[in-house]
Image: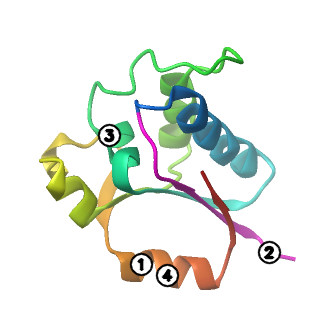
Amino acid sequence: MKTHVVIVLSCGTDNPNRSTRAIHLATIAHKEGKQTTLFLLDEGVYIAKQGLADHLRAATGDVADDLIAYLQAHEVPILVCTPCAKARRIEEKDLIEGARMATAAELIHLSCEAAIISL
């Protein structure tokens, strides 16, 4: 049985339902005792930029910034694709607390050891 879950999110503020759902799934995985990582790709990198996920909400009523606060409080890694962020002019200094830049190689390494959920 896998004990590590990687949630890969490729959409951001352009799709609040999927974005918030991914963050919610990361929260649930952590609460279920799984080692959890949230990896942001493509438009998903906007979720980690300070201020952009504020007030982002899914149709279910889940609020992204509340869920992100949970991940931050529990030190769940929030990894941001470096080239994806740079292409969108997001720098490390722009990221929310608990988020850091990461490479595709790191995603591949994590993926080999984990169950993957991609949104």
Which amino acid type is shown beneath numbered disc 3? Answer: Tyr
Checking the image for residue 46, the label placed there is 3
Give how far apart the Cα atoms at labels 4 and 2 are: 16 Å
Asked which colour scheme the image uses, the reply is rainbow
Give how far apart the Cα atoms at labels 4 and 1 are: 5 Å
Which amino acid type is shown beneath numbered disc 1? Answer: Glu
Depth check, front residue: 73 or 20 = 20
Give how far apart the Cα atoms at labels 1 and 3 are: 19 Å
Binning the other alpha carbons within 10 Å of mark 1 as few (below 14), some (14 to 19) or many (20 upward) gives few
Q: Which one is closest to the eye, mark 3 or mark 2? A: 3
Q: Is residue 91 magenta?
A: no
Checking the image for residue 106, the label placed there is 1
Which residue in the structure is indicated by mark 2?
2
**Which span of residues is magenta-colored?**
1-12
Checking the image for residue 108, the label placed there is 4
Which amino acid type is shown beneath numbered disc 2? Answer: Lys
Helix or strand or loop: what does disc 1 sit on?
helix
